[in-house]
Image (spheres, grey):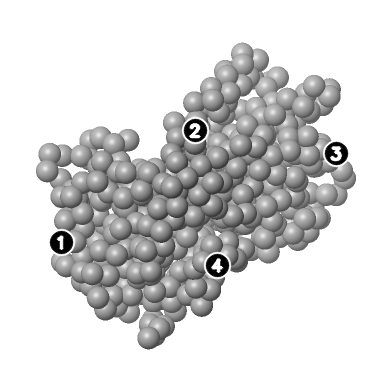
Amino acid sequence: MKVLIVSLYHPELVRGGAQQVAYELFEGLQQRADVEPYLLASADHNSPALFKSGARITGFDGRPNEFLFLTQEYDYAWEKGANVLLVEAFKEFLELIRPDVVHFHHFLTFGIDLLTLTRRVLPEVKIVFTAHEFLAICPANGHMVRRTDASLCTRASAVRCHQCLPERLPEHYFMRDMWMRRHLEAVDVFTTPSRFMISHYTNWGLDESKFVHVTNGMRARGVTLPAASKTGARKRFGFFGQMVDAKGLHVLLEAVALLRAGGFTDFTVEINGDNIHFATPKRRAEIEAFLAAEAEFPLAERNVLFNGSYHPEQLRARMARVDWVVVPSVWWEIFCLVISEAWSFGRPVIASNAGGPAERVRDGVDGMLFELGDARALADAMYRACTEDGLWDSLAAGITPPARQEEMVEGFVGVYSARKAA
């Protein structure tokens, strides 16, 4: 069975949970004798050296069956590619590979219209689409967060979308909704890594019978680590991930400021992340100003340390430096791979109480939940983590090991192999 995995970015070019999951699925499928996998991952002009005159789809770094889709002229208003030659190259790629299954892990940077194109080029192919957020529903980056008041959004409409993005008329969002639904009709099976997502999509109007929950798995990266603190106190917190607005790093920094303002400074926060260039100018300026001010303190007096970006093989060493992992996301965080990473190393999680984290983290059992976007609530949770005897040991003992790569691969092979609906 030939399987083509279409991924938003290659994780070695742009870090992110969706592309990491797609790549680990590709790696896992390579270990099976009954599957011949191919990977087509997008690249953009943040990797300018990869763009050559006339190139549209190229091999990647000499690796078998790994290819890059060199995105150009993308139309974000309609989520479609505007370069006709690139669309033609995708068509020719499908005809060359002739997969039995095309598994889209995103349409961003490719274009949602490529779903329909795939169906037209290969009428018998099975099309699987994994939703990593709500971009089909929500034009505000797929986050379903109201830009009017930063509250979580539970439904989209032409007027509500216009309120968040007033630069376009309500009629545009009405037509966008029709455009998205039309191309999603080409999909045979939708998969989601978290169960709560299914109700969002079915309430929007998609057929619930087409949805399957397949959890994200991850490659084993080591064994459970002992607590980093030597004295028994658990006062070291870690942030891991992209430094963009939705991930809520600004909430964590506000919590740090609140703790210090209250006279509590016996703690450390280590920031491990990158892609701050994807943050809005306002958030980027806030974060960079905070880190610059922190760097003015002597090292021994800093509460916040910035460690920069990291690769998967560095994760074990980074996790060994902290006791707790903080997930302060301010959107419907879909799955949050960093929760799995933290649990794989025995680290309890302190997370926002919505979306995937709320579905996964059992408050008071294997982690703590706090009110989404509430820096005071996060500060209270961090103070409790630092001062309550036995809390870390209790929560660490309650951790269940997360799903592994092999479980995810088996789940998707089952989806690929299932008979298509008539």
Left or right relative to 398: residue 171: left
Choose the circle earlier in sequence order: 3 or 4: 4
Cα separation between marks 1 and 2: 35 Å
Q: Is 20 drawn above or below residue 274 in the view shown?
A: below
Would you say residue 297 is visible in this rendering?
yes
Q: Amino acid at mark 2?
A: Ala
Using the rendered view, name the quadrant where residue 6 is placed. bottom left
Q: Is 104 drawn above or below residue 231 in the view shown?
A: below
Mark 1: few, some, or many residues within 10 Å (few <14, many ≥20)? few
Q: Nearer the viewer, mark 3 or mark 1?
A: 1
- Judged from the image, the secondary structure of the residue bearing numbered disc 3 is helix
- Judged from the image, the secondary structure of the residue bearing numbered disc 2 is loop
Using the rendered view, name the quadrant where residue 224 is placed. bottom right
Choose the circle earlier in sequence order: 4 or 1: 1
Q: Residue tagged by mark 2?
A: 279
Q: Amino acid at mark 3?
A: Thr
Marks 3 & 4, CB-CB < 8 Å contact: no
- Which quadrant would the N terminus be assigned to in this image? bottom left
Q: Residue tagged by mark 1?
A: 92
Residue 51 position within the rendered picture, expressed as x and y whole percent measured from the top left: 20, 39
Residue 34 position within the rendered picture, expressed as x and y whole percent measured from the top left: 32, 79
Q: Nearer the viewer, mark 4 or mark 2?
A: 4
Left or right relative to 327: residue 16: left
Q: Nearer the viewer, residue 319 or 110?
A: 110
Cα separation between marks 4 and 1: 34 Å
- Judged from the image, the secondary structure of the residue bearing numbered disc 4 is helix
Question: Which numbered dot is residue 202?
Answer: 4
Q: Amino acid at mark 1?
A: Glu
Choose the circle earlier in sequence order: 3 or 1: 1
Cα separation between marks 3 and 2: 33 Å
Residue 143 position within the rendered picture, expressed as x and y whole percent measured from the top left: 54, 47
